Image (cartoon, grey):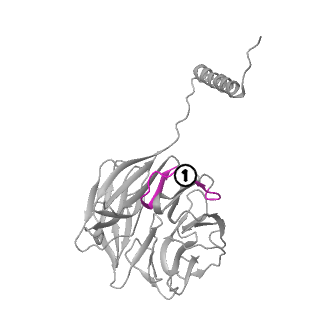
Amino acid sequence: MKKQLYPATLLNIMIGWLLLMVACDDKNTGSEVPVLPKWKEVASFSNFYPASVWFTEAGEGFIAGAITDSSNRLIQGSIRYTDDNGQNWQEFTSDTLPPLSDICMNNSGNGFAAGGECLLRTTDNGKTWSSVFRNNGWFFQSVSYDGSAGVMATDLLGRIVVSNDMGEHWNVRTGITSCQLCSISNPGQQESAIAVGMMNSTQRQYGIILRSTDQGTTWDSIPFTGSLMPCSVVRSQYSNHFIAAGGNTIMRSTDGGSSWKQSFYGLDVMLIDVSISASGYGFAVGQNGGLLKTTNDGNTWTYETRFTEELLLAVFMQSDRRAYAISFDPQTRKARLTMWN
């Protein structure tokens, strides 16, 4: 009499047979099962609130933020920098340096940082910084550097400053909007520049997208549909597409910022920052460890398993296989740098 095979037993036999075939095939061909990238902590900083992170192709990294006191008040600005992909860090700070909110670099050692009433510049890979714009009453939130000579920065009172000579001279643009301008993307003189922000008051709440096609001389408000309250905008390194993220929405433009379409909406995330690599891979991060991933230049987004419940403040794609995210825990007053690799 033949022994009856129950469905569960048959299924186990089939799975075992398939696994055996795969193992034999790997053994014969010499191929290996690919290891998927994962997130792991590479550095932590006590009494430090991080606001922005940037890495060059050579592994030089920069984190801009502020030193905190026991009440989590931001005391003074601080820039942490590394030249070995985050294994060892040094610090630049000053008693007169305001809390910093953004940083951007190129691969030749030049870069800018923004915060409070001033803009800073470095020409030696972040070892030293000097003020190139300082004006009481300004509240700089974002700075964008095209890697050559063009620099643009925004503040929380809707103002924009523009330089075409590496910060030696500045043109001030006021009266553009009353919104808080949170982020700006300045790809270069032959491309559109995009600034985004929001009006977040008890009377009104809405987002705004501004576009300039003349190197920041004039700005137009671009209409869009959706509930975007943008905190971050980037130009994809893969294409001439712009991605804007904030709150529970991500929007995408494929025509240089002339029009925008919603590419993600989710009630269970509150997004703060977004970054896209040269091949269209990217992440968006936010509150409570919120994490989204795209593999098609921001056209669609999927939820990723959260590796932390902390506040994820910034993310940067160094390459298709490596990203960095920075988080902050207000209970321990500790910042953590996590690498996806």
Q: Is residue 10 above or below residue 84?
A: above
Outermost residue toward the right in this view: 1
| Residue in front for this viewpoint, 243 or 217 | 243
Q: How many marks?
A: 1
Image quadrant in which you'd find residue 268 = bottom right
Visible in this render: residue 88? yes
- Tell me which residue sits at (34%, 66%) in the image: 65
**Is 315 included in the stretch rendered in magenta?**
yes
Percent position of residue 209, x then y? 58, 76
Percent position of residue 43, x then y? 34, 51
User: Is 206 on the left-hand or right-hand side of 4?
Assistant: left
Percent position of residue 221, x then y? 60, 81
Secondary structure under the numbered disc 1 in the rendered image? loop
- Tell me which residue sits at (55%, 35%) in the image: 34
Q: Is residue 139 above or below residue 52?
A: below
| Residue in front for this viewpoint, 40 or 106 | 40
- Which residue matches tag 1? 304
Visible in this render: residue 124? no
Outermost residue toward the front in this view: 1
Percent position of residue 73, x then y? 30, 72
**Is 165 included in the stretch rendered in magenta?**
no
Q: Quadrant of the N terminus?
A: top right
**Mark 1 residue crowding within 10 angstroms, few (<14) / some (14–19) / many (20+):** few
Amino acid residing under circle 1: Glu
User: Is 67 on the left-hand or right-hand side of 32?
Assistant: left
The residue segment tinted magenta is: 297-319
